[in-house]
Image (cartoon, helix red, strand yellow):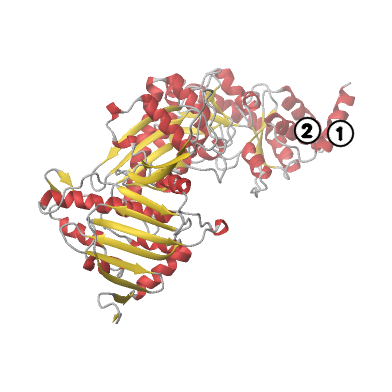
């Protein structure tokens, strides 16, 4: 420390090493948006007022705050901006410790002192109540010099602190008539390319306050210039009649409706607030509030939109939950608080004690975040379940807009998979134009049925015409018809619903009917396989390039053949999707199943029996394979070959 010889009361100090490093980081790295400095100073001012109100409850010598407020004073000529509060203020020692030394945090020390006695007279001690956090140093992003004049409540003299952010600061006594703090920023020149706005402009300050500090509890005031004009009898402005006046205005609404009792907030206010934060001109479909208490405190007001945003399935699409800490805006795209499959949710989460990183711009991944997220998800899903039970029409409207996104949770969120399965609405062969729930599907299952059957495909008509469904239709078994691309993913990760296995009708083997019917079908198939054993081996040898096995099937009634995969194989629809996205598709061969009761199979058996080396068997085998591909909507490996073979067969037939 050195002392100025000409001004004995003026002291010059050097910042601690870590403080100088922080100043450099503040100016060049930590904050991505320079406007943030005003949020930080307003937040600090609000904390200072909180602290005075709290301490005045237990210390009768301290003045009770009268008209607590935060005042902004821009000066265009001097190119300065002052932020003033009438909170607790700081002593000289506070200024040195809190501003000159990062390691000492007023908030931390104050909170430690209150740990054993958290409340007085029913008032809970406010969180984050340090007069200055590291956010104060963000001022040096926009200012060449910063001056602080402060007086602590209960003390007679004030302190003046000043620094140009060059590693040193000065401190001296100052006369100040009231308690509180005034920070004056000597602003750098405006530079729009560098994101440096002119912070003496009224509209700039209004917009920043509106964005970041609109819901701060105390009025944020500013003297605003108004121009009035005299008008003639026709209402026209009289030239030269301009009169200017200065009026003090409150810039923030202070209407954090999530903090007000639900009974005091009208439906129109909820709708207006939704449109304000979402920029959606539709009314919300519904909304709900929740309060979290315990080891941490937070409130949430969340909305479910009526219409899906255009960017719902864009990777770079915006998310909708705004994060506040003590009603101070932190971010509007808070991915950490809502899983990706609920990205359509809009609203706010306001925490009293959420831990943030040094810039408040990125959340630390800690237990508070995980706990808040977990409770938010549970609340969203329970709200949707209530809607589904109490207003089915409204829920189907929701499902039509957001069902595809909600399905993503079936493979992303294992913890809530059971709840999500109850919310799923799906088309089926027995639901007609309506959608069914899995619960209703179970209620319609046939006697002896032990699986939930489904099939994925490009569209409903293709699936319903698939040969894979023939036996199911004949016996009256219901099959879920899944046509969303996302269905291919979740059906590979959801194996059961209420202990009933899900099975694709296009994979594995199928056994339908009662135990007696299954046993009889198995015996019939075994008998047919003995009869056609040599033919099946011959066809497999001829189609070895394309299929791994040729066998008889009991899933076909009208079609001569179909292709079936193993349970772990990709479906044809999934393979086509991956290829369309230029993604690698693993090489796999499927099983060609033949209908043992079809006339074509019998004719093939006759040809083979008369001459096992008949060259036409090669062509017939490929025709069957191609026909199976066409029936399921898959591309052919050699369309020209199939076309020529079909022409040859037609000529012979005619």
Q: Which corner quadrant holds the N terminus?
A: bottom left
- Tell me which corner region of the image, top left, top right, bottom left or bottom right, holds residue 301: top left
Q: Nearer the viewer, residue 196 or 223?
A: 223
- Residue situated furthest left in the rendering: 60
Seen at 41% across and 24% down, the residue is 388
Residue 315 vertical position relative to residue 462 in the rendered view, above or below: below
Horizontal relation, residue 428 to residue 613: left or right: left
Q: Is residue 82 visible?
A: yes
Distance CA(mark 2)–CA(mark 1) = 10 Å
Q: Nearer the viewer, residue 563 or 71?
A: 71
Horizontal relation, residue 199 to residue 119: left or right: right
Q: Which corner quadrant holds the C terminus?
A: top right
Q: Nearer the viewer, residue 354 or 312?
A: 354
Horizontal relation, residue 217 to residue 627: left or right: left
Seen at 11% across and 51% down, the residue is 58
Seen at 37% across and 41% down, the residue is 249
Secondary structure category for the residue under label 2 = helix
Label located before the other in sequence (2 or 1): 2
- Tell me which corner region of the image, top left, top right, bottom left or bottom right, holds residue 522: top right
Task: Give the class, few, some or many, for how many residues have Cα within 10 Å of label 2's Cα (few <14, many ≥20).
Answer: some
Percent coordinates x, y for residue 571 in the rendering:
61, 38
Percent coordinates x, y for residue 503 in the rendering:
51, 33
Residue 493 vertical position relative to residue 462 in the rendered view, above or below: below
Tell me, for residue 364, which label it has, or none.
none
Percent coordinates x, y for residue 190 in the rendering:
52, 58
- Please report contact status of discs 2 and 1: CB closer than 8 Å, yes or no: no
Percent coordinates x, y for residue 473 in the rendering:
58, 20
Q: Which residue is mark 2?
A: 623
Horizontal relation, residue 126 to residue 201: left or right: left
Q: Which residue is mark 1?
A: 644
């Amino acid at each position: 420390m050195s002392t100025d010889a000409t001004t004995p009361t003026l002291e010059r100090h050097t910042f601690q090493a870590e403080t100088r490093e922080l100043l450099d980081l503040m100016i060049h790295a930590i904050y991505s948006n320079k406007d943030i400095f005003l949020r930080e100073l307003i937040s600090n001012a609000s904390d200072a007022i909180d602290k005075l109100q709290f301490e005045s409850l237990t210390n009768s010598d301290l003045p009770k705050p009268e008209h607590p407020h935060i005042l902004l004073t821009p000066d265009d000529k001097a190119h300065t901006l002052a932020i003033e509060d009438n909170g607790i203020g700081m002593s000289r020692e506070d200024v040195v410790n809190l501003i000159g030394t990062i390691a000492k945090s007023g908030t931390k020390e104050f909170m430690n002192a209150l740990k054993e006695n958290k409340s007085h007279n029913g008032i809970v001690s406010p969180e984050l109540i340090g007069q200055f956090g590291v956010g104060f140093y963000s001022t040096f992003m926009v200012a060449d010099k910063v001056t602080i004049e402060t007086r602590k409540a209960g003390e007679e003299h004030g302190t003046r602190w000043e620094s140009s952010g060059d590693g040193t600061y000065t401190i001296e006594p100052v006369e100040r008539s009231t308690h509180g703090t005034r920070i004056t920023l000597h602003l750098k020149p405006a530079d729009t390319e560098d994101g440096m706005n002119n912070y003496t402009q009224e509209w700039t300050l209004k917009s920043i306050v509106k964005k970041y500090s609109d819901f701060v509890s105390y009025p944020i005031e500013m003297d605003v210039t108004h121009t009035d004009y005299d008008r003639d009898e026709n209402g026209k402005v009289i030239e030269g009649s301009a009169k200017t006046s200065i009026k003090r205005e409150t810039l923030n609404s202070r209407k954090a409706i999530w903090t007000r009792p639900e009974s005091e907030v009208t439906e129109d206010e909820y709708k207006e607030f939704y449109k304000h934060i979402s920029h959606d001109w539709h009314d919300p479909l519904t909304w709900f509030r929740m309060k979290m208490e315990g080891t941490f405190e937070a409130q949430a007001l969340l909305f479910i939109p009526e219409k899906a945003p255009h960017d719902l399935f864009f990777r770079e699409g915006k998310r909708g939950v705004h994060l506040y800490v003590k009603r101070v805006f932190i971010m509007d795209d808070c991915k950490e608080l809502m899983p990706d499959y609920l990205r359509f949710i809009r609203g706010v989460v306001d925490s009293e004690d959420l831990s943030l990183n040094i810039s408040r711009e990125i959340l630390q991944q800690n237990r508070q975040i995980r706990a808040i997220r977990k409770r938010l998800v549970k609340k969203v899903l329970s709200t949707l379940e209530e809607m589904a039970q109490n207003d089915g029409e409204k829920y189907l409207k929701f499902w039509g807009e957001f069902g595809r996104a909600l399905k993503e949770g079936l493979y992303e969120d294992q913890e809530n998979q059971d709840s999500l399965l109850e919310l799923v609405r799906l088309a089926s062969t027995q639901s007609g134009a309506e959608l069914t729930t899995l619960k209703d599907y179970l209620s319609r299952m046939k006697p002896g049925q032990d699986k939930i059957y489904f099939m994925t495909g490009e569209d409903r008509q293709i699936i319903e015409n698939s040969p894979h469904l023939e036996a199911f239709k004949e016996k009256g078994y219901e099959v879920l018809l899944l046509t969303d691309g996302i269905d291919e993913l979740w059906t590979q990760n959801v194996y059961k619903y209420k202990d009933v296995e899900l099975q694709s009708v296009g994979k594995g083997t199928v056994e339908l009917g009662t135990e007696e019917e299954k046993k009889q079908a198995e015996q019939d198939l075994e008998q047919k396989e003995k009869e056609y054993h040599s033919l099946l081996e011959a066809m497999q040898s001829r189609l070895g390039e394309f299929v791994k096995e040729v066998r008889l099937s009991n899933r076909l009634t009208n079609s001569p053949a179909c292709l079936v995969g193993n349970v772990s194989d990709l479906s044809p629809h999934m393979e086509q999707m991956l290829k369309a996205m230029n993604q690698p598709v693993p090489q796999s061969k499927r099983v060609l199943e033949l209908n043992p009761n079809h006339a074509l199979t019998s004719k093939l058996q006759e040809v083979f029996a008369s001459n096992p080396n008949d060259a036409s068997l090669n062509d017939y085998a490929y025709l069957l394979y191609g026909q199976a591909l066409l029936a399921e909507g898959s591309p052919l490996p050699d369309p020209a070959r199939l076309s020529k073979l079909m022409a040859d067969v037609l000529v012979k037939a005619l």
